[in-house]
Image: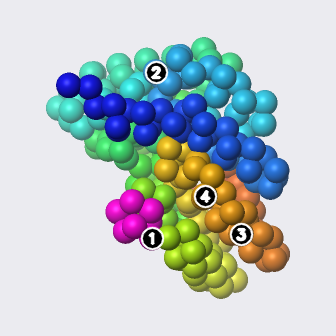
């Protein structure tokens, strides 16, 4: 039986929601890191072209959303094939090699960092255990973990916790305030995970405008793409990278 409610809800993000969010963040002058799987890239090329035109970042995100890497836990060759096919599509549609990777549902295997580093990627986003990027040593060179978050994530605060936009705004401000205070001693990263079928509805837009307006009141805030964070980390922590 076709699951039309779930399918069309998600389809809203591709047909309507992402464009509304693109316009909002473009107007705010805030760059985005946009994750996409290879299947979406092949079927929704207009989205890829808009992100490229904005000079935002595209992050490889598996071949298709439902094929999770842990099903290849004991099949490294199979996992490698999925990743390489995804990266092949990325290069075809984006016109450059991928810099980073986010596994679908953040589900990866112990082999994933090695496969990504061997393929020439600089970073992954699957681990949520820090507020700063950190280095992963692999047999194929360094890989930076640029942390993701399911805590500061629209699925969590809007659907799992049923928070109002006002409550979510207060939470984001509190998260930002604490990290900003801590950054007096060492830089901190605030990740906000958004999905266009969740956050791309009209009633959410003022929520984002209010938060971005709040952040603009503070000095020394870097609105960075994930690849920018990885590049900064590699450039500034060269002494921590062992020779190969």
State whether residue 60 is above or below residue 40.
below
- Disc 4 target residue: 203
| Residue 187 visible at all | yes
Q: What residue is shown at x 47% (from left), y 32% (from top)?
A: 11
Counting other residues with Cα less than 10 Å from the Cα at mark 1, is it few (<14), some (14-19), or many (20 or more)?
Answer: some
2 or 3: mark nearer the eye? 3
Distance Cα–Cα, label 1 vs label 3: 16 Å
- Mark 4 lies on a secondary structure that is helix
Assess whether mark 3 and mark 1 are in contact (beta carbons under 8 angstroms). no
| C-alpha separation, residue under disc 2 versus residue under disc 3 | 34 Å
**Please, what secondary structure does the residue beneath circle 2 have?**
helix
Q: Does residue 76 appear anywhere in the picture? A: no
43 vs 139, left or right, is: right
User: Residue at coordinates 63% horizontally, 52% vertically from top-left?
Assistant: 202
**Disc 4 packing (10 Å; few <14; some 14–19; many ≥20):** few
Q: Determine which of the numbered discs, if any, sits on residue 210 in the image.
A: 3
Which residue sits at x=44%, y=66%? 157
Magenta segment: 157-163
Q: Secondary structure at mark 1?
A: loop
Question: Dot 2, how many residues are within 10 Å of its Cα: few (below 14), some (14-19), or many (20+)?
Answer: some
Reply yes or no: does residue 159 show up in magenta: yes
Q: Nearer the viewer, residue 33 or 226?
A: 33
In-image side of 20 versus 128 (left or right): right
Front residue of 149 and 18: 18
Circle number at residue 163: 1
Q: Residue furthest left?
A: 74
**Closer to the camera in the image, 138 or 217:** 217
Residue 226, percent from left and from top: 62, 49
* 22 shown above or below 165: above
């Amino acid at each position: 039986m076709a699951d039309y409610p779930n399918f069309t809800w998600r389809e809203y993000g591709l047909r309507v929601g992402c464009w509304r969010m693109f316009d909002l963040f473009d107007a705010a002058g805030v760059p985005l890191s946009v994750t996409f799987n290879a299947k979406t890239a092949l079927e929704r090329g207009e989205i890829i072209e808009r992100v490229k035109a904005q000079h935002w970042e595209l992050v490889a995100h598996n071949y298709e959303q439902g094929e999770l890497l842990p099903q290849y836990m004991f099949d490294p060759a199979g996992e490698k094939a999925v990743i390489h096919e995804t990266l092949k599509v990325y290069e075809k549609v984006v016109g450059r090699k991928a810099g980073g990777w986010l596994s679908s549902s953040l589900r990866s295997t112990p082999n994933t960092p090695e496969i990504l580093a061997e393929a020439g990627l600089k970073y992954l986003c699957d681990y949520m255990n820090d507020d700063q990027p950190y280095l992963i040593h692999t047999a194929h060179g360094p890989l930076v973990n640029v942390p993701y978050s399911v805590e500061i994530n629209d699925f969590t605060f809007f659907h799992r916790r049923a928070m109002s936009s006002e409550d979510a705004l207060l939470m984001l401000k509190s998260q930002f305030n604490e990290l900003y205070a801590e950054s007096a001693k060492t830089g901190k990263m605030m990740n906000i995970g958004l999905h266009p079928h969740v956050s791309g509805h009209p009633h959410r837009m003022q929520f984002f405008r209010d938060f971005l307006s709040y952040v603009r009141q503070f000095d020394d805030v870097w609105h960075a793409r994930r690849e920018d964070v990885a590049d900064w980390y590699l450039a500034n922590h060269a002494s921590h990278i062992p020779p190969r």
